């Protein structure tokens, strides 16, 4: 997939500092947005699967880990 142009509004001091330091604001914004999207996808997945995760945790607490008897450590 290619790149698209978007408009961002930044604090003037932040933008000036980034320019002064020679930072690529587009790449920094892209990386930050990608990380935020990853965190949000993970949060949503955990929320959508909360019941199953909780049920599995309860099962492990009651019965121990599956195949635990085969562990050599």
Image (spheres, rainbow, N blue to C red):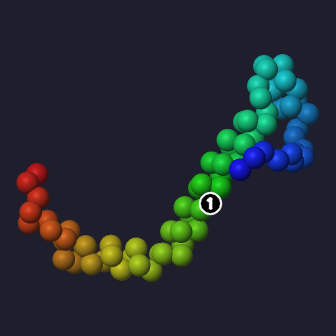
Q: Is residue 44 left or right of residue 52?
A: right
The single residue placed furthest to the front in the displayed view is 1
Q: Residue at x 33, y 76 (%)?
A: 56
* For residue 3, side relative to residue 44 (left or right): right
Of residue 39 and residue 26, the one placed in the foreground of this image is: 26
Q: Which of the 4 quarters of the picture holds residue 53?
A: bottom left
Count of numbered circles in the view: 1
- Where 1 sits versus 51, above or below? above
Q: Position of residue 57 (x, y in %)?
A: 32, 73
Tell me the residue at 18%/77% (across/down): 63
Out of 27 and 59, give the one closest to the viewer.
27
Image spot of residue 4 (x, y percent): 82, 47
Quadrant in the rendering for residue 58: bottom left
Q: Residue at the spot x=66%, y=48% of the render? A: 34
Label 1 environment density (alpha carbons within 10 Å; few <14, some 14–19, many ≥20): few
Q: Position of residue 3 (x, y in %)?
A: 78, 45
- Nearest to the observer: residue 54 or residue 48: 48
Q: Residue at x 54, y 72 (%)?
A: 47
Relative vertical location of residue 62 with respect to residue 27 in this rendering, above or below:
below
Q: Badge 1 is on which residue? A: 40
Left or right of 51? Residue 38 is: right
Which SS class for mark 1?
A: helix
Residue 18 location in percent, x, y? 81, 26
């Amino acid at each position: 997939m290619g790149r698209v142009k978007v408009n961002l509004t930044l604090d003037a001091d932040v933008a000036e500092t980034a320019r002064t330091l020679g930072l690529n604001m587009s790449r920094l914004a892209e990386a930050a947005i990608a990380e935020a999207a990853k965190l949000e996808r993970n949060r949503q997945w955990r929320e959508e699967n909360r019941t199953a995760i909780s049920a599995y945790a309860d099962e492990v607490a009651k019965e121990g880990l599956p195949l635990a008897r085969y562990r050599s450590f």
